[in-house]
Amino acid sequence: MNSTPGGARPEIHDIVVIGGGAAGLSAALTLGRARRSVLVVDAGEPRNAPASAVHAYLGHEGTAPGELLAAARAEVRGYGVELRRGDAVAARREGESFRVDLANGTRVEGRRLLVTTGLVDELPDVPGLAELWGTDVLHCPYCHGWEVRDRAVGVLGTGPLAVHQALLWRQWSEDITLFVHTMDELDERACEELAARGVGVVVGEVASLATRDGRLTGVRLADGTLMDRQVLVVAGKLTPRAGVLSSLGIAPTDLEMGGAVIGAHIAADPTGATEVPGVWVAGNVASPTDQVVAAAAAGVRAGAAINGDLIAEETRAAVAARRARLAGAPFSARLEREVCEVVLGDRRHGL
């Protein structure tokens, strides 16, 4: 067993990956192929579970999310990666490694930590909306636009980005209506742009959704007016699953787009390295707007960076051990220096 209850010391892996989605499994694949010992801990709560298919992922277009994950798990196991179902609740540095506490009372440990826990879409509080999330209530046209092309689409206005959403979704349908709902009054420029693109505008708060046989049929306003719609576009608040990171002193920061705060994320450098040495992030926890293919690419990038960081550490340790060994054997040290000088001299003279 690689995890132990109570105070027993678990086996130390090279890397513990928390989160088994596209980012986490791509990193695990990269690190497994680098001959690292990798443990992936996954709570089994993928963000795209309600979706019927993954899109814009070359070679995997239209694949069901569960099918893609099953194939990925089989691939990483082929390189010796260990997968374990579990919910990581806290982590802390202990000496040269990180100890991660799981909800079931066990612990796992790794020299490096990669967090790919994704995010939660906090949806507007409209009755009936959450039940249709991922089917007829959508957010990303690049994920779902083709599948609902030419349908009657409504855009729920909850902030200043709603106008941008309405204009964006106009690419996939001529029948777009912006429901002002709780957003601020539209300015003159927004009204002109929407009118020029043939986007309808309805003032009034949305009270509920109308459905038939589990599918959206309309949007009901607070005054009782029912407007036929087949799709509703919403902008939920993007909240990273960052609880395990907070125990390490890493807090989310606001994420802005178009001058509006659309949620939060964990700040990191381009490789995913956080402000805490030895801790990386990848996928939606760091970049909430990434689609599956981008999250997978971020996992590969983080995995390569972590392997490079471990190599640098191992090289430093090897150099220190060599120096200590040679310090106790002056003759051997002098002989090695002479050999190095001969080799370097040959290279300088092109030999």
Image (cartoon, rainbow, N blue to C red):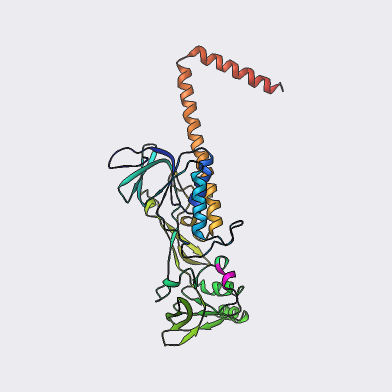
Instruction: Please identify the quarter of the rendering in which residue 60 is found.
Output: bottom right
Q: Nearer the viewer, residue 176 or 86?
A: 86
Q: Residue furthest left?
A: 6
If the image is split into quadrants, where does the C terminus sit? Answer: top right
What residue is rendered at 50% in x and 59% in y?
Answer: 65
Where's residue 172, x and y in %?
A: 60, 73
Residue lying at the far top in this picture: please name it: 331
In magenta, the rendered stretch is 144-150
> Is residue 344 highlighted in magenta?
no
Q: What is the tally of numbered marks visible in this picture?
A: 0
Residue 48 position in % (x across, y down): 48, 62
Q: Residue at x 41, y 84 (%)?
A: 222
- Placement of the N terminus among the 4 image quadrants: top left
What residue sits 50% from the left and 31% below the top? 315
Q: 47 above or below 235?
A: above
Q: Taking the image as drawn, is residue 79 in sight?
A: yes
Residue 271 shows in this picture: no
Q: Nearer the viewer, residue 54 or 268?
A: 54
Q: Is residue 74 above or below residue 169?
A: above
Residue 145 lies within the magenta run: yes
Give percent across and percent down for residue 103. 32, 51
Q: Residue at the location (51% across, 12% down)?
A: 331
Q: Looking at the picture, how far across and down is residue 8, in whole percent?
A: 30, 38
Residue that lies at the very extreme toward the right in this rendered image: 350
Q: Is residue 136 above or below residue 279?
A: below
